[in-house]
Image (cartoon, helix red, strand yellow):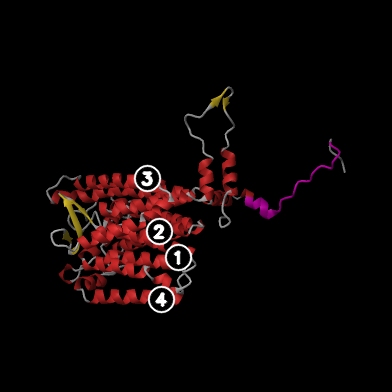
């Protein structure tokens, strides 16, 4: 065997087998491997939450402007009236998102009780004559003067997430969650109190979202199956009674899958939502060219804005919205699954349950698969009362995603684009972009891949 210059035998190169050569030569497999590596980077959840929420909000502003013009003109208002109000709410919500994303976890936990107390007080004020006001038959609004109103029940969702996460985290630290009494009390009674205040105003859609958040927190806390089923059975029984005793709710339930408005046009909104989606085709009729928003489709810029999106942007537009919500939901689950802080796990899981459940209920109603619950599409539909707490909740997820050990290491390795210090020979040190991923991977917790 010939020797090398150092006197050592030359190293033999490993002979690649057919499977290895095919993996290298296959462009589809190479693309899949690169996508898998990019998907598993430390900042993936951070970028998905930030980018996905901003894209949904911006697209929602565009669709609110398009869907609300006819309604505003019919009310003798400027065509951009609803858009301007939504844009103002988005700006305020952006400030709340930025503040929440920069707040430490301890401060979020400290805000749990004040937010819960404020939400309960506001929800009680709704029932006071002269303060609360009814909209579309539901007594769940407080007038702030002029055309500005607030719906306190929307802030009740954020209050339940923060307070429930803090409560369960403290009980887990004290090893109390193994006892079913500590798991249920006082979480379930407080949640039922919020549900009772909401149902006094007749808003069953928001009550369903609050119930979903409660079940999400119990599931994350590891509630046993019999306990979970028991609470679910009680909630289902109460919901069945509320539906059977309300002709309006029974009519909505009967409109599932309807293709004809029926006697008295009871299913008018559901059917015209299907008409809007059906007439959109693949790429839609064009932005602003919806026909159903000309008085045919009620609540075109609020509960049924997804139908107008399908008519104007087509199947491609609706699938894009679904993909953004799916990415947001995946990122929230990833944040909740990779943390070792119990409060972060419960809060991230609660926010993800909230946004995902509300999106599914809204889109399912537009598609005719679920009864119309009267809940807006998160970050997308018109409504400042729904947008502000939702954007604060998105800020929570961003803060939690930034707080992951691998994400902190990746962010710490970044160099500013401008203002880098220069020495006599240029930059003070070589750029270390290529080592960022390796160092971030070394800082990951044991639960991460």
Residue drawn 38% across the image and 56% down it = 322
The percent coordinates of residue 180 (x first, y second) are 44, 74
Q: Which residue is mark 2?
A: 352
Left/right of residue 2 with respect to residue 210 in the rendered view: right
Tell me the residue at 45%/47% (across/down).
Answer: 47
| Position of 415 relative to 212 (above/below) | above
Question: Crowding at label 4, few (<14), some or many (≥20) Cα neighbours within 10 Å?
Answer: few
Q: Which mark is residue 171?
A: 1
Q: Main secondary structure of the magenta part?
A: loop
Q: Which label number is shown at residue 98? A: 3
**Image quadrant containing the N terminus:** top right
Range of residues picked out in magenta: 6-23
Report helix, strand or loop for mark 4.
Answer: helix
Under circle 3, the secondary element is helix
Look at the picture and state if 335 lies above or below 266. above
Based on the picture, tell me whether residue 325 belongs to the magenta stretch: no
Residue at 34 percent of width and 51 percent of height: 391
Observer-nearest of 440 and 130: 130
Which is more N-terminal, label 3 or label 1? Answer: 3
Q: Where residue 214 appears, x then y in whole percent?
A: 37, 66
Q: Is residue 406 left or right of residue 332?
A: right
Q: What whole-number distance in Å separates the C-alpha atoms at marks 4 and 1?
A: 22 Å
Q: Is 266 in front, or is 362?
A: 362
């Amino acid at each position: 065997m010939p020797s090398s210059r150092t006197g050592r035998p030359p190293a033999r190169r490993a002979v690649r087998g057919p499977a290895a050569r095919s993996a290298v030569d296959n462009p589809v497999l190479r693309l899949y491997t690169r996508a898998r590596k990019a998907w598993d980077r430390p900042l993936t959840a951070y970028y998905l939450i930030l980018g996905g929420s901003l894209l949904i909000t911006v697209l929602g502003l565009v669709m609110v402007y398009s869907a609300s013009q006819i309604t505003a003109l019919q009310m003798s208002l400027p065509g951009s009236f609803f858009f301007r109000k939504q844009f103002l709410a988005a700006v305020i919500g952006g400030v709340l998102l930025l503040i929440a994303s920069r707040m430490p976890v301890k401060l979020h936990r400290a805000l749990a009780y004040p937010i819960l107390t404020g939400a309960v007080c506001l929800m009680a004020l709704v029932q006071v004559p002269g303060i609360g006001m009814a909209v579309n038959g539901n007594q769940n609004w407080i007038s702030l003067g002029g055309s500005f109103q607030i719906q306190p029940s929307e802030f009740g969702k954020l209050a339940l997430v923060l307070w429930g996460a803090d409560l369960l985290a403290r009980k887990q630290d004290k090893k109390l969650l193994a006892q079913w009494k500590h798991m249920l009390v006082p979480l379930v009674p407080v949640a039922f109190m919020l549900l009772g205040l909401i149902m006094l105003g007749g808003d069953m859609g928001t009550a369903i979202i609050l119930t979903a958040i409660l079940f999400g927190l119990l599931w994350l806390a590891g509630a046993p199956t019999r306990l979970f089923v028991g609470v679910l059975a009680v909630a289902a029984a109460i919901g069945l009674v509320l539906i059977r005793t309300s002709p309006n709710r029974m009519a909505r339930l009967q409109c599932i899958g309807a293709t004809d408005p029926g006697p008295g046009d009871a299913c008018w909104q559901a059917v015209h939502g299907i008409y809007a989606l059906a007439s959109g085709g693949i790429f839609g009729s064009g932005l602003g060219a919806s026909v159903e928003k000309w008085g045919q489709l009620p609540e075109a810029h609020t509960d049924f804005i997804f139908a107008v999106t399908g008519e104007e942007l087509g199947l491609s537009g609706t699938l894009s919205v679904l993909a953004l919500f799916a990415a947001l939901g995946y990122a929230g689950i990833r944040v909740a699954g990779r943390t070792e802080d119990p409060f972060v796990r419960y809060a991230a899981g609660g926010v993800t349950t909230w946004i995902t459940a509300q999106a599914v209920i809204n889109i399912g109603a537009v598609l005719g698969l679920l009864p119309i619950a009267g809940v807006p599409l998160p970050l997308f539909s018109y409504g400042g009362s729904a947008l502000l707490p939702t954007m604060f909740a998105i800020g929570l997820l961003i803060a939690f995603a930034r707080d992951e050990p691998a994400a902190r290491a990746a962010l710490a390795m970044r160099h500013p684009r401008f203002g880098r210090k220069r020495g006599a020979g240029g930059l003070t040190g070589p750029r270390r972009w290529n080592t960022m991923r390796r160092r971030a991977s070394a800082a990951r917790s044991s639960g991460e891949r």
